[in-house]
Image (spheres, rainbow, N blue to C red):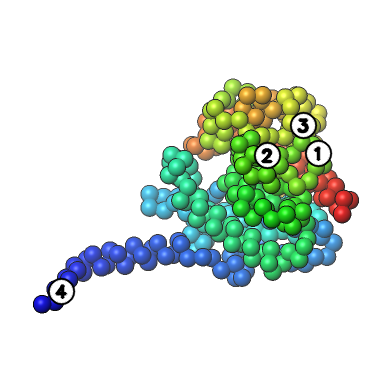
């Protein structure tokens, strides 16, 4: 006699709803669709290089949502705005490519490190697929700058580890500006293609720093007991030498349209901490520049990483482009 399996209708409905919801977040994004890019600039006129930029975290997340949905138009507007705030640092002499991706929400960073990874992996899958589409359809051997801030910096470092093992693509890399995330000696040893910047004009390297007050000894981006590698964006040195604020060409605070709403020359100096490898900022206070996010305590200047050193970074991008081109 055949046994008949009776499955409750409610169970079927629950499974169907779950699969439907999951599939929306696990299906690959079609990067041949221009609506899945914030910027996709293909005109090569007077553009010496390409910038592939990965947006920082703008999605807050919710109790039942940990990755941004690309159908969330309000968050996509913030996403575009966050890109615009940094875009002019990088794009003066370069085409600009910035994919929309299902970035992990801020709520993911409240989790234990091991629990975050599934959500960061989904974000990285999008970034990796977007880069592959750009590289195969538009690059044509052109020099590349990778750039990202915060989660975007993490994504750029992951892309370096996975995609830049290939020597041909390594040779195309001008630099990777991975600001606001850590990079360690252990990672450098494990992935030989990762090279930390040592000066103002070396190429094929990672430029990274994490800004904080002198009193800080622990943060989300550089946990206590971790030493990150860094370069000082004021004097372009990797030691603990103090760079005076007179070297600061201009701190720029920008809006979501990319307009500079305030610019201050000589705002602050900085030096690299010998123990943490972080960038200690010397001439501002947490009261003047509060952390702004619950995941950071005051004195962690994460939100100001690129704003404090905007003009120095902008100048440096051009220096590295010129250095790369002069070697070819």
Which residue is disc 1 drawn over? 200
Camera-side residue: 306 or 26? Answer: 26
Q: Which residue is pictured at 61% across the width and 62% down the height?
A: 130
Q: Which residue is pictured at 78% across the width and 39% down the height?
A: 312
Q: Which residue is pictured at 46% across the width and 62% down the height?
A: 26
Q: Earlier in the sequence, mark 3 or mark 4?
A: 4
Q: Which residue is pictured at 73% across the width and 54% down the height?
A: 167
Q: Could you give the CA–CA distance between mark 3 and mark 2, rounded to whole angstroms?
A: 12 Å
Contact (Cβ within 8 Å) of mark 4 with mark 1: no
Q: Earlier in the sequence, mark 4 or mark 1?
A: 4
Contact (Cβ within 8 Å) of mark 4 with mark 2: no
Q: Residue 287 lies in what quarter of the image?
A: top right
Query: Of the numbered discs in the image, which one, if any, rests on residue 208?
Result: 2
Q: Is residue 44 above or below residue 310?
A: below
Query: Of the numbered discs in the image, which one, if any, rests on residue 13?
Result: none
Q: How many labels does the image show?
A: 4
Residue ranking furthest to the right: 326
Secondary structure category for the residue under label 1? loop
Q: Which of marks 3 and 2 is nearer the N terminus?
A: 2
Where residue 280 appears, as percent x and y from the top left, is 66, 27
- Confirm whether residue 22 shows in the render: yes
Q: Could you give the CA–CA distance between mark 4 and mark 1, rounded to whole angstroms?
A: 73 Å
Tag in front: 4 or 2: 4
Q: Could you give the CA–CA distance between mark 4 and mark 2, rounded to whole angstroms?
A: 62 Å
Image side of residue 34 versus residue 297, left or right? right
Residue ranking furthest to the top: 215
What crowding class fits label 1: few (fewer than 14 Cα within 10 Å), some (14-19), or many (20 or more)? some
Which residue is disc 3 drawn over? 237
Q: Could you give the CA–CA distance between mark 2 and mark 1, rounded to whole angstroms?
A: 13 Å
């Amino acid at each position: 006699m055949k046994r008949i399996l009776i499955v409750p209708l409610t169970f079927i409905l629950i499974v169907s709803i779950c699969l439907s919801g999951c599939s929306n977040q696990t299906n690959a994004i079609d990067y041949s669709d221009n609506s899945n890019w914030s910027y996709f600039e293909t005109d090569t006129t007077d553009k010496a290089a390409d910038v592939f930029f990965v947006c920082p975290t703008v999605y807050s997340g919710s109790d039942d949502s940990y990755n941004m949905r690309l159908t969330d138009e309000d968050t996509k507007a913030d996403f575009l705005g966050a890109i615009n705030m940094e875009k002019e640092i990088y794009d003066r002499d370069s085409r600009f490519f910035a994919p929309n991706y299902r970035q992990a929400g801020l709520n993911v960073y409240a989790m234990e490190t091991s629990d975050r990874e599934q959500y960061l992996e989904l974000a990285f899958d999008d970034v990796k697929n977007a880069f592959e589409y750009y590289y195969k359809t538009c690059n044509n051997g052109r020099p590349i700058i990778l750039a990202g801030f915060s989660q975007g910096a993490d994504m750029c470092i992951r892309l370096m580890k996975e995609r830049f093992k290939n020597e041909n693509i390594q040779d195309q890399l001008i630099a990777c500006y991975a600001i606001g995330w850590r990079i360690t000696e252990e990672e450098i040893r494990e992935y030989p293609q990762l090279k930390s910047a040592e000066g103002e004009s070396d190429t094929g390297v990672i430029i990274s720093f994490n800004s904080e007050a002198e009193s800080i000894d622990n943060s989300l981006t550089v946990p206590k007991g971790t030493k990150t590698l860094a370069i000082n964006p004021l004097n372009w040195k990797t030691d603990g030498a103090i760079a005076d604020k007179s070297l600061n060409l201009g701190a720029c605070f920008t809006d979501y349209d990319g307009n500079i709403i305030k610019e201050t020359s000589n705002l602050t100096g900085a030096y690299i901490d010998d123990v943490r490898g972080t960038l200690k900022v010397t001439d501002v206070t947490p009261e003047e520049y509060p952390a702004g996010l619950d995941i950071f305590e005051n004195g962690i200047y994460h939100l100001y990483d690129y704003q404090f050193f905007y003009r120095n970074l902008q100048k440096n991008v051009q220096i590295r482009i010129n250095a790369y081109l002069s070697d070819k």
